[in-house]
Amino acid sequence: MLPFLKLTLLTLLITAPGLLVSGENVITCDGNIHRLSCDYGLIIVWSTLYGRTDRSICSTTHPPLQVTDTSCFSSISTIVERCNGLTECEVNTDLLDTPDPCEGTYKYYHTSYSCFPVLKAVICEHGYSTLECGSGKYIQIINANFGRADTTTCSNGVPNGLTKKINCYAPNTFATVAELCNGQQSCTVEASSTVFTDPCPRTVKYLTVSYICLRQ
């Protein structure tokens, strides 16, 4: 996902917190791999604290003096910048240049994040589909492509020679679908070269659209 989309998603969710469907917390001892993942949907990080607010967490192999300070923490933005908008994310905390909020205390990373649903439509060439969000919600397009990325989608009854060309992406598909559908409760889109440019002639194409529903 493009960096500007990660920032846009975060802004949208801050203004529409009712969208959240699951809450997760990950705690990783300093120097280890910090892992965030969503079984479905995308990661949105709400906060990451670096320090110590609990004596028992990440304390078994350290002397008492290194775990007694529980008022030691600072908020960091690195995890937000690296993980927002992804389905899974791994960060090696040993490589993070994080300012030390309490020298002499063994610290950990505590990240709170949520996963939110992404809806997807696949429309074979010359077909139509209606994206819908229901009452009180509106569409926000996350990704869109008109072309072909594999040999199997929309291939039923189609000669093999018309599905072999992949890595076929029409420019400006995202912008076109976003302009048509963003902010609408429902939106009908057509998978056609008359709507989008033809990125691969003599190839049967399809339109894929990923979107979320935000509360009004």
Image (cartoon, rainbow, N blue to C red):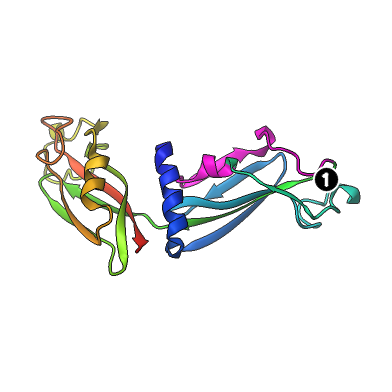
Does 25 lie within the magenta span?
A: no
Query: Toward which corner of the image does residue 168 lie, by quadrant?
Result: top left
For the residue marked with disc 1, what is the amino acid?
Thr
Left or right of 66, for residue 178: left
The one of 118 and 46 positioned closer to us in this rendering: 46
Residue interval drawn in magenta: 79-103
The one of 206 and 159 positioned closer to us in this rendering: 206
Q: Is residue 81 above or below residue 52?
A: above
Residue 212 is situated, as x and y percent measured from the top left of the image, at 34, 55
Q: Is residue 153 above or below residue 18?
A: above
Callout 1 crowding tier (Cα within 10 Å): few <14, some 14–19, many ≥20:
many
Question: What is the tally of numbered marks visible in this picture?
Answer: 1
> Do we see residue 113 in this rendering?
yes
Residue to which mark 1 is pinned: 105
Q: The C terminus appears in which quarter of the rendering?
A: bottom left
Query: Toward which corner of the image does residue 31 lie, by quadrant?
Result: top right
Q: Is residue 89 above or below residue 197?
A: below
Does 94 lie within the magenta span?
A: yes
Residue 14 is situated, as x and y percent measured from the top left of the image, at 47, 56
Element type at marker 1?
A: loop
Residue 114 is situated, as x and y percent measured from the top left of the image, at 51, 57
The residue drawn where x is 40% and y is 57% is 117
The residue drawn where x is 42% and y is 49% is 9
The residue drawn where x is 18% and y is 35% is 163
The one of 216 and 33 positioned closer to us in this rendering: 216
Q: The N terminus appears in which quarter of the rendering?
A: top left
Residue 198 is situated, as x and y percent measured from the top left of the image, at 14, 33
> Do we see residue 151 in this rendering?
no
Left or right of 89, for residue 187: left
Left or right of 212, for residue 116: right
